[in-house]
Amino acid sequence: MYKNSTQKLLQLHTIKKVGHDLLLKMNQTLTQDATGTLVMLSLEKLNPTEIKTNLSVQYCDHNLLRLDEKNHQDHEYLRTMCAKYGVYFSPPGNGISHIVHFENFSQPKSSLVGSDSHTCNSGAMNMLALGAGGLDVSLAIVGQPIYLKEPKVFGIELKGELPDWVSAKDIILELLRRYGVKGANYYIIEYYGDGLKRLTCWDRMVLANMGCELGAVTTVFPCDEETLKKMNEMKTIYNSNNNDNILDNDIRHEYDKYDSIDLSKLEPLIATPHSPGNVVPVSELTKKENIEIFQSYIGSSANPGLRDFYIGSYILSKFKDQFSSLLTDRISLDINPTSRHVAYQMSKLGITQKYLELGSKIHIPGCNGCIGMGQSIGEHYVSLRTTPRNFKGRSGTKEDMVYLCSPETAMASAIKGKVTDPRELGLEYPKKELMELPIYEPSFASFRNILEPLSKERRNSIMVKKGSNIKPLPDLDKVPYNIEGPVILKVEDNISIDEIIPTGSQVIALRSNIYEISKYTFKPIDDEFYEKTKDIDCFFIVGGSNYGQGSSREHAAIALRYLGLRVLVAKSIARIHLQNLLNFGVLPLIFENEEDYDKIDEGDKLSIKNVRSFIENIINGEDNQTIRLQNLTKHTEMPLILNISSRQAKSILYGSLINMIKEEKIL
């Protein structure tokens, strides 16, 4: 018997334990085009003879707007790199990476690491699915283990059945209401209980996707009859054909932390700007305010299933006359099919036709407006979205007003032209119809459009196409003996990656060019940040708690390191970004006393002596040490904590993880 399903997965994939770290063997990797170019650039530096995973897949789902030649250059680079190294390639238009992976490659009891923070989606299929920085993923592709600080497990029992007009999005919003965006930091969330029986794999993906908004390492669902139903109905490209005896019937449900949710008592919820953690009941919000809306947006990695599009079209069809006048007046109704397969199902079942007849905008399957790639609306105009994040400016509009909600709430609000509780529409809930929706359309198999790996013989003749926008990674020097420099930026709590490196068509097009993308660092916060770095070789940044939450984009680490960042001092740092900082030689220091955060100001000159000695002591096995930070401007001193492993210390010492691998001839 295992304590829980998470322990079972971790034991299955742990090679060994070193200190507090588990060394995990990864069966699969996932990359997407916003992060995949850096993965492939790292892979070129590693220059393996072949990949060592069971399968690796590259998706093109983020930057689907080809405003000039840059995106096509990147996609051609990714396509030819996949052909050269034996990686599956999913071209633009196939859909969101997590959804296409779920449909074609998900495998219970398997392990997956992806260069996208929402890789945790696949936890819905009883996979150990981890988001990570691109360099860590490139190392997994060549057979190196993923290092993970041994996590605790947060067990959440689901009881009962959801009421009408309440769906999976409301479950995860309820957890965000209770715990906020830091409530599951360094935990793996595991769901269990009788309430699971009434949640499909598509419903489970909603919960798994937004677990990372709680700060969780990942989310795990047990392997049960629903998991096997998906495996049997949706014939994947990759299937080990080993679905016997994989049910989690040997679990004791023992956890480090517990909570429970009575599903029958939930109501429609909504996250107000500008955080997924700002959750209130829709009914409570509408009593206080009459919030006029200008956009409703359905479809994302956080609401990916056919049922999410069906319920929207069902509501719309009941109020078609009323909505037509609103549409003409002001409402933008944006429909984002999450995969080519889901789009095919929508078309076959007449869902697309209903949307089109009433003037909706049907977009190409992909991430789209979730990351600011189109579908933006004006400043201070309210948009209701079924996406996972609403950080300020993420939509592509600097002063946006994005609310997160279920498809039911999004469509009800579109009908009424203001934020509306879907229960107020007075409609009969189509429970039977939702239950009868197919998981998979068998005739779609011939339309998958995923390029499979070439034979080894054919790979040798592949010429990689690298356009002018694709630049090699910058060379990074070793850590100096002493670090001294100014604080050029001080930020508050919960700074997201989107605020460090913004999203949107202009910036993401530069994802394979660190030299150019670095010019946009911290632009949403300080428009002059890049200019401030020009004449400074070494600088500090001071952050609050949960610094670097959200995306896994390692650009937020390497671009700053290239500009001169040597030390980040913060109250706490989000897990993936912490590892990205270490991978590129940035020293991540934590305030021993949080009140010392108030004792440093922008412009202060700071100094740390004997840095190399501290690092070498950790490498030699000494406990993590307290480092003394001198504030030369204020003539004060304060203790900082350096809590890293011996391996991470080597990455800092050599200046980057790639430098360490070369110096120690690991590959």
Image (tube, rainbow, N blue to C red):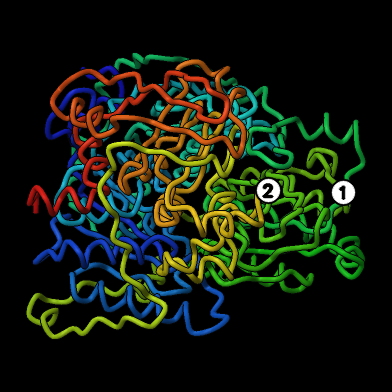
In front: 478, or 48? 478
Name the element at disc 1: loop
Q: Residue at x 78, y 35 (%)?
A: 282
Q: In the rendered image of this protein, does residue 536 appear above or below residue 253?
A: below
- Given residues 95 and 548, the one toward you in this image is 548
Query: So how many labels did they put on this image?
Result: 2
Quarter of the image for the C terminus: give it: bottom left
Residue 545 is marked as none
Q: Horizontal placement of 599 versus 572: left or right?
A: right
Badges 1 and 2: C-beta atoms under 8 Å apart?
no
Q: Is residue 646 above or below residue 637?
A: below
Residue 267 lies, in percent from the top left, at: 71, 30
* Mark 2: secondary structure: loop
> Dividing the picture into quarters, in which one does residue 42 lie?
bottom left
- Identified by mark 1, the residue type is Lys
User: Which residue is under mark 2?
Assistant: 392
Say which residue appears at 26% left-offset and 33% top-offset. Answer: 247
Residue 32 figure quarter: bottom left
- Spot occupied by residue 388 in the image (x, y as percentages of width and height): 58, 46
Quadrant for residue 126, please give it. Answer: top left
Task: Give amino acid for label 2.
Answer: Lys
Is residue 282 something that shows in the picture? Answer: yes
Residue marked by disc 1: 418
Q: Is residue 246 left or right of residue 119?
A: left
**Which residue is depicted at the point 58% across and 23% down?**
179
Q: How many C-alpha atoms fall within 10 Å of the one at disc 1: few (<14), some, or many (≥20)?
A: many
